[in-house]
Structure formats: structure tokens, C-alpha cells
Amino acid sequence: KWIAVILFAFISVMLAIFLYNFYTVVQISSKIIEEEHLLQNTKTTATMIREKIKSDLNTVYGLASMLSSFDSINSEEAKAFIHKAGQEYPFSILMVTDLKGNYYTNNNSEINLKEPYYLIGDTSNNKRITVIYQNALYGRDMISLDSPIYNGNQIVGMVSGLFYVDY
């Protein structure tokens, strides 16, 4: 009689230990699978973001090429072109800047570029992400995708596709 009680208790304890270990292994396996899934999603998202930026950089480069065909990047025709392009392309704002620091945007926004704390990072004459404008418009940070505008072999300005950082 005591042997049966002890045997039943022993089997119950062993079954509880087995079930606890099984539950723990299942939990660990599901966490590993979840982490692998998250890692794959992260890689996919990063690839999509890289492709989006690459596509948008090519758009900015194409806009710079089209702007170079105007007599002046500050002409009314160039401004009308940027206004229309701003409605068709995915940027929050399109901005054209000449070598004297004059600029205009597709939606006639006032962007304060004269204050030094708005600009983080270096500008360059290459087609790439060049600057972040801090609190430049509506108190929101912006990333700028820039490309130089050439007239012949001479740079006459810069076209910038601006995105809000939170976008």
C-alpha cells in the first residue's frame, strides 16, 4: 500500500518535471522562431528602405538633370516645373537652391537655412543623403536627398528632395 502511494507520488513528480521541461523547451523554441521572424522582417524592411532611398535619389538626380535644361534655375518656368513635380513625386517638399543661397520650394514654404543650428552634417556636390535640417519647417526635422544642378560642366545650384524624419 505504501509502495503504491510512493510510486504514485514519484510518477506524479516525474510527470510534473517532464511537463515543465517540455513547456520550457516549447517556450524557448517559439521565442527563437519569433526572433528569426523578426530578424527576417527587419532585413526585409531595411532592404525596402534602401531601395526607396535609392529610387528617390535617382528621382532627385533626374530632376536636377531636367532643371539644367532651363535658362536659369530661378526662372518662372523652372519654378513652375518644381511646383508641378512636387505634386507628382513622393517628397514632403522639393527645394531648389542657387549658389548665392537663394532658394524656392514647390509649395512656397519658408525654410530658415540661415540659422546654423538647422543644419546637421556636411553638404556636398554628390548625389546622396547630405544633410538633416533640424526644426527647419513646422518645427520638424527633415532629411534632404540632394543632387547638384549643372549647366554644362559648372554647378549652378542644388535640388533637394526633403522628407520629414518621422516619415
Image (spheres, rainbow, N blue to C red):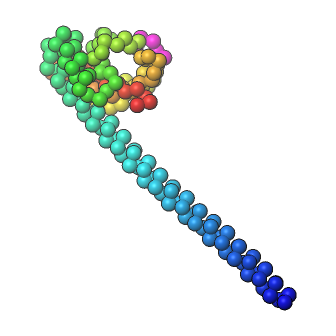
Left or right, residue 115 beside residue 150: right
State the residue lying farthest toward the front: 1
Any part of residue 154 in sight: no
Image label count: 0
110 up-or-down from 32: above or below: above
Residue pictured at 36% horizontal, 46% vertical: 47
103 up-or-down from 3: above or below: above
Residue pictured at 25% horizontal, 34% vertical: 58
Quarter where residue 88 is shown: top left
Q: Is residue 145 magenta?
A: no
Q: Whole-percent x and y of residue 7?
A: 78, 85
Indicate the quadrant containing the N terminus: top left, top right, bottom left or bottom right. Answer: bottom right
Left or right, residue 33 beside residue 93: right
State the residue lying farthest toward the right: 2
Quarter where residue 102 is shown: top left
Any part of residue 164 in sight: yes
Q: Whole-percent x and y of residue 66?
A: 17, 24
Residue pictured at 59% horizontal, 62% vertical: 27
Q: Is residue 117 magenta?
A: yes
Quarter where residue 157 is shown: top left
Q: Whole-percent x and y of residue 101?
A: 32, 11
Residue pictured at 50% horizontal, 60% vertical: 33
Query: Of 49 and 159, which appears nearest the observer?
Result: 49
Left or right, residue 61 beside residue 123: left
Q: Whole-percent x and y of residue 95?
A: 30, 18
The magenta stretch is 113-118
Indicate the quadrant containing the C terminus: top left, top right, bottom left or bottom right. Answer: top left
